[in-house]
Image (spheres, helix red, strand yellow):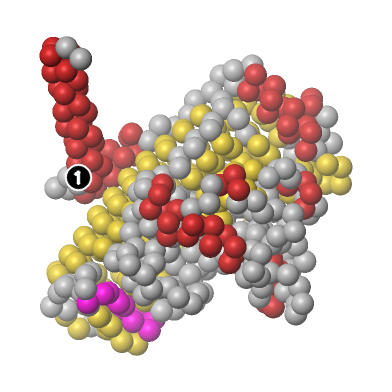
């Protein structure tokens, strides 16, 4: 190699390194006013736009009687819209029975008022297998009910209902709980050929195309998943009776969830779970769920560490959280980390809402959570705590490992709580790496059974904060 060429090579390499370093700093930098950063995230989250072309689902053979399967009508309409360069597919008033809906680039699916889309109870309709995810681990499994992979510019809007038709007889029994229809002798996700096998594949980093599940297995499909997609909006529609997690953006960017209602109380019915995602805005939504309302994730164990894409730049605003294990949660599948989360102007209130803000991990998951800002929240009632941070999380055995989690810079401001549950603040950190830099400003928590329970955390900074009338300092 000539000397001049070698010099140019090293200059380019240095420039790349500097650029990468700057990108990393930008990704983690928070302005002196963090809410200016939140506004910047909103402005930088691209919302898709579409051609004016209109496609009516009925023109592609849809019947809409709730009995005839309209799967092919959805497929043909989406294909035609995509091939024409994009546009809007109108689903007119009616009840449409269908298998999975696979969206493509530049397609806007619009449900008019009075539309209900019923998803088939026939498991074979969710074949062939697709590249998807289950509890933070990628695999080949039944198709999500609504799915897109490697697409750009997608919208689902309207006032209609997506009904997954999951219940105690369909999908839910696989969770293994009698409450959800499981009976002794029935197969369940905990069986050796299901989750234990997938966990081992995760540990050994088996290639995803060799993690083959689906028929003969009992791992429930997601309701809505976009994988490796850009510029996605879901607006106005309602999701109910989900088999598993409801809204799951995965390895995607520029995601807007606006005015959506999730009313689904099945097992693991998380409302919205951004995972390995950047620039996500969740606003004006109602979550009434069987699990976490919003749970921000970034992969489980070795999968998360191998992918190594933090979930970052996420804004939640003007939402209502009712039933759920947590209002806004980070974890537990969090091995690649979460940062820059902003939550404001939300209402959280239910005797069946366990916590308002929750962070959960352990030393198998590891990961980090940093730069979390929560402001202007009204909490009526929570069952357990207003803020819970747990680095010993584990509903399964053997949750200890070699990956020490790091949690720091968690800020709560202008929070009022009428009934604080068992604890106002509940933190369980690690002696080897305590939770750091927790600030509560203008927080008032009433009727907590115990003000705080804090282990292995640096001294919390209290500013004008009261729990049960006691000034905290």
Up/down of 447 relative to 442, above or below: below
Residue 57 in the figure: left or right of residue 460: right
Seen from the viewer's position, the closer of residues 25 and 348 is 25
**Outermost residue, front side:** 1
The x, y position of residue 43, in whole percent, is: 33, 34
Left or right placement of residue 45 versus residue 214 in this view: left
Spot occupied by residue 458 in the image (x, y as percentages of width and height): 16, 73
Residue at 45% across / 42% down in the picture? Answer: 251
Residue 38 occupies which quadrant of the picture? top left
* Region in magenta: 419-431
Q: Is residue 323 visible?
A: yes
Q: Position of residue 267 (x, y in %)?
A: 61, 67
Q: Quadrant of the N terminus?
A: top left
Residue at image position (45%, 40%) is 252
Q: Residue at x 73, y 33 (%)?
A: 74
Compared to residue 69, the image places residue 52 above or below, namely: above
What kind of element bears circle 1? Answer: loop
Say whether residue 58 is magenta: no
Q: Is residue 117 above or below residue 402?
A: above
Look at the image and tell me in which quarter the C terminus lies: bottom left
Q: Which residue is mark 1?
A: 29
Is 422 included in the stretch rendered in magenta? yes
Task: Give the crowd class for mark 1: few <14, some 14-19, many >=20 residues within 10 Å.
Answer: some
The location of residue 309, given as percent across then percent down, is: 37, 46
Q: Main secondary structure of the magenta part?
A: strand
The quadrant holding residue 355 is: bottom left
Q: Residue at x 17, y 79 (%)?
A: 472
Q: Quadrant of residue 385?
A: bottom left
Nearest the eye: 276 or 156: 276
């Amino acid at each position: 190699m000539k000397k001049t060429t070698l010099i140019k090579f090293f200059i380019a390499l240095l420039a790349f390194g500097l650029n990468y370093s700057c990108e990393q700093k930008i990704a983690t930098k928070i302005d002196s006013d963090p809410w200016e950063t939140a506004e910047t995230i909103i402005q930088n989250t691209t919302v898709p736009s579409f051609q004016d072309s209109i496609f009516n689902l009925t023109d592609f053979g849809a019947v809409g009687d709730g009995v005839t399967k309209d799967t092919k009508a959805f497929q043909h309409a989406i294909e035609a819209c995509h091939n024409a360069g994009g546009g809007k597919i109108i689903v007119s008033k009616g009840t449409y029975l269908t298998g999975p809906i696979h969206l493509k680039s530049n397609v806007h699916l619009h449900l008019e008022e009075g539309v209900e889309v019923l998803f088939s109870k026939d498991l074979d309709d969710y074949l062939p297998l697709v590249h998807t995810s289950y509890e933070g681990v990628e695999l080949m499994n039944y198709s999500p009910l609504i799915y897109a992979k490697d697409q750009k510019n997608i919208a689902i809007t309207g006032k209609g209902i997506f009904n997954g038709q999951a219940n105690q007889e369909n999908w839910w029994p696989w969770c293994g709980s009698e409450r959800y229809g499981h009976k002794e002798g029935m197969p369940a996700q905990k069986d050796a050929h299901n989750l234990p096998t997938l966990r081992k594949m995760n540990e050994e980093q088996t290639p995803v195309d060799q993690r083959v599940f689906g028929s003969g297995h009992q791992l429930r499909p997601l309701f809505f998943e976009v994988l490796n997609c850009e510029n996605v909006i879901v607006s106005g529609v309602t999701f109910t009776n989900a088999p598993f997690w409801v809204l799951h953006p995965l390895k995607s960017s520029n995601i807007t969830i606006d005015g959506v209602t999730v009313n689904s109380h099945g097992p693991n019915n998380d409302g919205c779970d951004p995972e390995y995602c950047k620039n996500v805005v969740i606003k004006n939504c109602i979550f009434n769920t069987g699990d976490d309302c919003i749970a921000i994730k970034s992969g489980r164990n070795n999968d998360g560490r191998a992918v190594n894409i933090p979930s970052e730049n996420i804004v939640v605003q003007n939402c209502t959280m009712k039933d759920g294990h947590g209002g806004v949660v980070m974890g537990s599948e969090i091995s690649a980390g979460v940062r820059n989360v902003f939550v404001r102007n939300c209402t959280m209130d239910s005797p069946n809402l366990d916590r308002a803000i929750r962070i959960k991990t352990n030393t198998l998951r590891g990961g980090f959570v940093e730069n979390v800002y929560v402001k202007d929240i009204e909490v009526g009632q929570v069952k357990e705590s207003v803020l819970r941070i747990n680095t010993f999380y584990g509903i399964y055995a053997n949750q200890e490992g070699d990956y020490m989690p790091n949690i720091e810079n968690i800020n709560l401001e202008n929070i009022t709580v009428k009934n604080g549950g068992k604890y106002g603040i509940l933190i369980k950190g690690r002696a080897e790496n305590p939770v750091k830099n927790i600030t509560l400003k203008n927080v008032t928590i009433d009727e907590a059974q115990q003000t705080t329970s804090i282990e292995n955390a640096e001294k919390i900074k209290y500013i004008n904060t009261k729990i049960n009338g006691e000034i905290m300092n």
